[in-house]
């Protein structure tokens, strides 16, 4: 027989939802791919006149101890609605710095698939004075995930109504 006190004590040991997914585990590195362009513009809106449905990517940059990392660079790029990267300009490319709570937010579109890859975002992030980390973010339940040789389930975004969320741990 379990007492009420013992049951409540055990409940305190259960991790808070969301924190267990990221804190303590450094976000895995992945290739930047062949289409990275340095010096992207400082901006949070990457839509640039597209008629495609808007998509918001938001989250935080955290330390392994779950503390927010303010002023961290977050650089995002992805292909367009046809599956093509802009290699001459900065369409669907931009960067920003996290706020005092480690938060970032980009408004963009859902990128198309292109041969050999599943749907994804490329991201570089770097705490001020820290090491640069490059990775990619994926859509859960995307049929092409199983065919993509570099896809990693732990890099899937949490999705809800046109929005994706991902907390990076550095």
Image (spheres, rainbow, N blue to C red):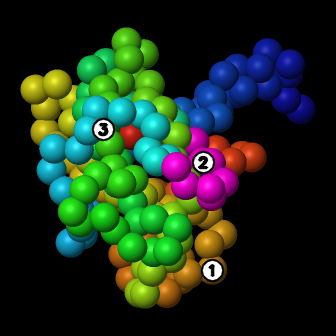
Nearest to the observer: residue 10 or residue 37: 37
Image location (x, y in percent) of residue 14: 65, 32
Note whether 140 is above or below 77 in the view shown: below
Note whether 88 is above or below 169 in the view shown: below
Which residue lies most toward the right here? 1
Image location (x, y in percent) of residue 169: 35, 38
Image location (x, y in percent) of residue 149: 38, 82
Dominant SS in magenta = loop
- Quarter of the image with the N terminus in it: top right
Residue displayed at 13% across by 32% down: 130
Q: Which mark is residue 95?
A: 3
Which residue lies most toward the front here? 49
Note whether 169 is above or below 87 in the view shown: above
Give the residue pinned by disc 2. 55
Residue displayed at 66% across by 22% down: 12
Give how far apart the Cα atoms at labels 3 and 2 are.
16 Å
Give how far apart the Cα atoms at labels 1 and 2 are.
19 Å
Marks 3 & 1, CB-CB < 8 Å contact = no
Which residue lies most toward the left here? 129
Give how far apart the Cα atoms at labels 3 and 1 are.
29 Å
Q: Relative to residue 15, is residue 130 drawn left or right?
A: left
Q: Assess whether residue 50 is covered by the magenta stretch.
A: yes
Which is more N-terminal, label 2 or label 3?
2
Query: Pointer 1: residues within 10 angstroms few (<14), some, or many (20+)?
Result: few
Q: For numbered disc 1, what is the local secondary structure?
A: helix
Which region is colored magenta?
49-56
Give the residue pinned by disc 1. 143
């Amino acid at each position: 027989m379990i007492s009420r006190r013992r049951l409540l004590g055990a409940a305190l040991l259960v991790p808070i939802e969301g924190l267990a997914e990221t804190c303590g585990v450094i976000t895995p590195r992945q290739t930047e791919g062949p289409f990275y362009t340095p010096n992207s513009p400082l901006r949070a809106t990457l839509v640039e006149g597209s008629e495609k449905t808007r998509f918001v990517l938001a989250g935080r940059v955290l330390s392994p101890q779950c503390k927010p990392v303010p002023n961290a660079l977050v650089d995002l790029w992805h292909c367009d609605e046809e599956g093509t990267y802009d290699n001459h300009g900065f369409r669907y490319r931009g960067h920003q710095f996290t706020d005092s709570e480690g938060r970032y937010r980009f408004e963009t579109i859902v990128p198309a698939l292109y041969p050999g890859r599943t749907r994804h975002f490329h991201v570089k992030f770097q705490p001020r004075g820290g090491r640069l980390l490059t990775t990619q973010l994926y859509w859960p339940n995307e049929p092409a995930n199983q065919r993509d040789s570099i896809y990693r389930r732990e890099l899937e975004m949490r999705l809800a109504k046109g929005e994706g969320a991902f907390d990076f741990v550095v």
